[in-house]
Image: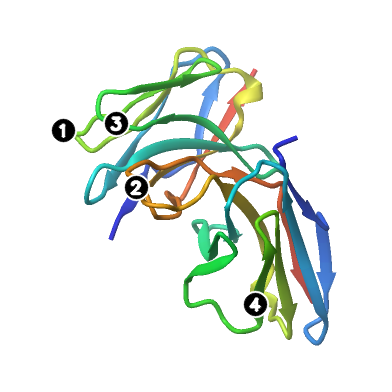
């Protein structure tokens, strides 16, 4: 149990479907992240939220839409995806991103294995 | 921008062999350095970390020393086990930024 829970663990969706990935953390953290992990490619940072505000969007296509209603929950809404979007989507959290001259580690969920058909 | 480079895998070892996985970084300022491990079908778990030069992170028999002069953070273990088979990621961050990861190194240990 890492304190970060992602649901569902596996998802198969068609290219015309709309689905959402959910992430919940019970660590009292204020920063949350979405990463994409594809085969043979490095981990790609997609979105960053700090105190519910989006602070980073790494040129992610608009078919991925994040939502952070509070510091404990993060969603990734998916619509009209492409087969190349099939990957493991990882959620993570950390204490925060306030620039106090310190940095903290991130804690990861187990990921959602997404297959687009 | 900041970046992390780690040795390409896969690394294949016999049980009880010595392990080294090289990691070097490029960064402005003074980053914190991390090693994460990912077991099959799982997310990433923090293995160890070091927050300043000459710090040594250690956990579960793994060690890494923050070497500012060589901008390195190599992962070592004296005697690997089959259960250590996994993908290992070197990472860094600085205050105010998200983690930046290397490409990962797959370790396979056989009995």
Q: Say which element carries label 2.
A: strand
* Quarter of the rendering containing residue B76: top left
Viewer-closest of B74 and A51: A51
Q: Looking at the rendering, in which quadrant would you find the C terminus of chain B?
A: top right
Q: Earlier in the sequence, mark 1 or mark 2?
A: 2
Q: Chain of mark 3?
A: B
Q: Secondary structure at mark 1?
A: loop
Q: Are marks 3 and 4 in contact (CB under 8 Å)?
A: no
Viewer-proximal residue, B3 or B109? B3
- In the rendered structure, are the residues bearing label 3 and label 2 in contact, judged by CB atoms less than 8 Å apart? no
* Residue A75 falls in image quadrant: bottom right
Instruction: Please name the residue that numbered disc 2 is placed on.
Output: B5
Residue A109: x percent and y percent?
69, 47
Labels 1 and 2 within one chain: yes
How far is mark 1 from mark 3, CA to CA? 12 Å
Q: Disc 1 marks which residue?
A: B69
Mark 4 residue crowding within 10 angstroms, few (<14) / some (14–19) / many (20+): some
């Amino acid at each position: 149990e890492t304190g970060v829970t992602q649901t569902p663990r596996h998802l198969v969706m068609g290219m015309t479907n709309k689905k959402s990935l959910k992430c919940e953390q019970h660590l009292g953290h204020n920063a949350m992240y979405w990463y994409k992990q594809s085969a043979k490619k490095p981990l790609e940072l997609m979105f960053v939220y700090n105190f519910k505000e989006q602070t980073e969007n790494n040129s992610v296509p608009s078919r991925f839409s994040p939502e952070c209603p509070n510091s404990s929950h993060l969603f990734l809404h998916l619509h009209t995806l492409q087969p190349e979007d099939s990957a493991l989507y990882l959620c993570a959290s950390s204490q925060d991103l306030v620039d106090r001259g310190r940095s903290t580690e991130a804690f990861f969920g187990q990921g959602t294995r997404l297959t687009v058909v | 921008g900041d970046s992390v480079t780690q040795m390409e895998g896969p690394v294949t070892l016999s049980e009880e062999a010595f392990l080294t996985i090289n990691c070097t970084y490029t960064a402005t300022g003074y980053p914190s350095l991390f090693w994460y491990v990912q077991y099959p079908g799982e997310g990433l778990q923090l293995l160890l970390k070091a927050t300043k030069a000459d710090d040594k992170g250690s956990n579960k028999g793994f060690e890494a020393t923050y070497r500012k002069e060589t901008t390195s953070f190599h992962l070592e273990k004296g005697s690997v086990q089959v259960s250590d088979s996994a993908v290992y990621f070197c990472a860094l961050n600085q205050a105010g930024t998200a983690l930046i990861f290397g490409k990962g190194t797959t370790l396979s240990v056989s009995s």
